[in-house]
Image (spheres, rainbow, N blue to C red):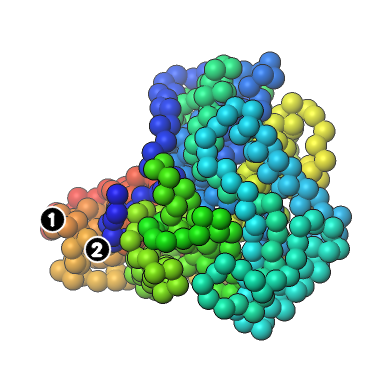
Amino acid sequence: MTQDFTNEPSSYWLDGPQIPEFAALSSSINTDIVIVGGGIVGIVAAYLLRNSGRAVTVLEGGRLLHGTTGFTTAKLSVQHGLIYDELISTFSEQDARAYYEANRQALDWVKEKTEEHSIECGLETRPAYLYAESSSGEQKIEKEFTAYEKLGIPGASLTKKTDLPFPIRTALKLENQLQFHPVYFLTALVKEAQAAGVKFYENSRAKTVHLPSQVELVNGHKVEAQHVLVTSHFPFNDFEGLYFSRMRVERSYAMTLRGNVQEDMGMYINVESPTRSIRTVLDASGERLLQIGGQGHISGRHEENTRTNYAKLRDFASSYYGTSEVTHNWSSQDLMPLDHLPYIGQMVTGMPNVFVATGFSKWGMSNGVAAAHLLADLALGKANPYEELFSPTRTKLRPKGIGNFIKDNAGVAKELIKGKVTGAEASLDELGLDEGKLVRVDGQKLAAYKDPSGNVTFVKPACTHMGCDVAFNQAERSWDCPCHGSRFSYRGDILEGPATAPLEQVHPKS
């Protein structure tokens, strides 16, 4: 169905698949391994553990696959932007090579399981391209290609020949990468895991972890386990290990459009700003659609109406591909770690039975599969060659990581202070239809949203995670936290963590 990007956002990946539905956890239970989070990491980990002889339970705060995994660009590639030159300079050639191998194995595993279970998930082999339109971008790509050569990454070449409809300076081409439909793939794994005895519970939001390995839910029920795997994208128990201070939260936008596109077009992403991520998808009717992504910014911090990001993506598609007929548009959040490596493993020293996977930057498909394998091995006491590389308790923070830590947390502190010292954005009379702003009513600052019929919903504006004032995201009709990316509906319901409590609705007298 064609829609205008100003309408309610919808993910292409969630329009079609029949995802199994599960009841909420209604009592306290015991299990061997509890997995908190029903996205790619949690589902793959559950699948891997299904025949381990352990009782496995998966808790999801909302619906399975309706978090970041359902709002991805779904590229399965080891080409993660300008990552390898960065890893060599920040860590070592050995570590950079290990990062490549972990992700390459993830691609091979997805391909193997797709064939083993005959999963119809649009898995296609495509070349991936990093491209540059500027001289500075060209220099960055040349350095990245040198890193590929040092690491012996096969199938790489520099080229000026692409199927892009506009001129470029150069591109780094990498053969034999994959694109797929993640929800169809993971839904098949859910069914396999369920058939083997894995228990799934939806609308069962975790609140905290009690030592040694007990998960308490928001509703008060508890899950006693031998091991806890925290796979909730942003860790719900992020005060353990101070994860809120170790990652930057970025929001980006995507859409699919109908038009004439090449059947065998590769996957593209540029090295300049704003980001342009380009690929195709094959829908259920056999029509080839264009997918464009980009326009990233720190979550909750955007000077313009966030709907302009969709407009800019559509204008790009119209200018270069001759199409502006939008079928779906959506946005998602990515967690950017300080030193470019994900945090996968023991969550914090002193909690040997609690493991975490987070901080995949913008490459959660391959990193997510790699993370699930590592967490499954750790839960079973097996050795894994990537345990040290991804260890969340790594203590040696490189100079660049220290700089990122200072910069990111200074930005958070600024937002926290700003919320306490600044007043309302507007008066209630100035609030337009289908608009949200911070207003002052009865002497208190409130977050107010006026729907198209003129009804106003008020919530307290302080994020329940750490107290930063939320900002209205017009594109999603949500209240987003500019500090750590928690998101709430205009009614205050949790859309995305790390917050575990909703915003309180208020009913002012005037």
Considering the numbered disc 2 on the image, is that residue within a helix, a strand or a loop? strand
Residue nearest the observer in this picture, 97 or 277? 277
Residue 354 location, x and y as percent? 67, 34
State the image quarter where residue 211 is shown. top right
The answer to whether residue 214 of the structure is visible from this angle is no
State the image quarter where residue 127 is shown. bottom right
Residue 21 location, x and y as percent? 40, 27
Residue 402 marker? none
Residue 370 location, x and y as percent? 69, 42
Q: Which amino acid type is marked by label 2?
A: Glu
Residue 471 location, x and y as percent? 37, 63
Asked whether the residues under the numbered discs 2 and 1 touch, taking CB atoms below 8 Å apart as contact, a structural biologist would say no
Q: As drawn, is 175 to the left or to the right of 420?
A: right
The residue lying at 52 percent from left, 24 percent from top is 191
Q: Which residue is mark 1?
A: 453
The answer to whether residue 129 of the structure is visible from this angle is yes
Q: Which amino acid type is marked by label 1?
A: Ser
The residue lying at 63 percent from left, 44 percent from top is 368
Residue nearest the observer in this picture, 268 or 69? 268
Residue 435 marker? 2
Residue nearest the observer in this picture, 394 or 100? 100
Q: Considering only order in the chain, which callout, 1 or 2, is on the residue closer to the N terminus? A: 2
Judge the density around disc 2: few (<14), some (14-19), many (≥20) Cα neighbours within 10 Å: some
The residue lying at 68 percent from left, 78 percent from top is 138
The residue lying at 52 percent from left, 38 percent from top is 121
Marks counted in the figure total: 2
Q: As drawn, is 391 to the left or to the right of 71?
A: right
